Amino acid sequence: MKDDQVTTSPASRRCRIRARVTEFAYPPVHDGVVIGVKAPLGLESFRRAISLLVAAPFEHIHVEDDVVGDILVRSAVLRRIDQGRLLSFVLRQVKPLMTGEEILHLDLQAEVELEDDGA
């Protein structure tokens, strides 16, 4: 080897893999889902999947919107939250967080205060 030649070592390569592994949550949908207008899994397909995986009945709320297409919500939730109020909440609070291609899971906590005068 001549003194004016520079030797180079082969390029070093590093590969790192990180993963978070968690148990599959069952049921996969607890309170509801918001389905985007361009979601790859449409309303009927999602309804069938839920009916196979979850025993609780779900209600469908159709939405006329440029981002949100449909909402599927557990029937028991609608006994505590008015459908119009839920729809308004989703459009104001959830819609800005999503695109039309997404399906977002809803875990709702509705608190209802009851008072009885005993009469």
Image (cartoon, rainbow, N blue to C red):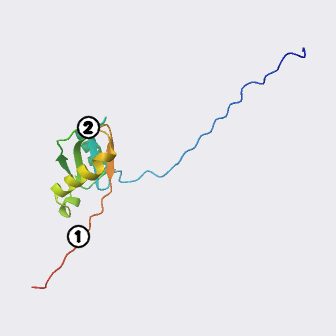
Amino acid type of disc 2?
Gly
Q: Is residue 58 visible?
A: no
Identity of the residue drawn at 25% across and 51% down: 92
Locate residue 106, reporting x and y percent. 31, 53
Q: Which residue is mark 2?
A: 42
Residue located farthest toward the bottom when viewing the structure as drawn: 118
- Indicate the quadrant containing the C terminus: top left, top right, bottom left or bottom right: bottom left
Above or below, 93 relative to 101: below
Locate residue 74, reporting x and y percent. 24, 55
The quadrant in which residue 57 appears is bottom left
Above or below, 13 relative to 89: above
Locate residue 55, reporting x and y percent. 27, 54
Amino acid type of disc 1?
Val
Q: Dot 2 lies on which element? A: loop
Q: Dot 1 lies on which element? A: loop
Identity of the residue drawn at 26% across and 64% down: 110
Distance between mark 2 and mark 1 Cα atoms: 32 Å
Above or below, 38 relative to 107: above
Residue located farthest toward the left when viewing the structure as drawn: 119
31 and 1: which one is in front? 1
Q: Which residue is mark 1?
A: 112
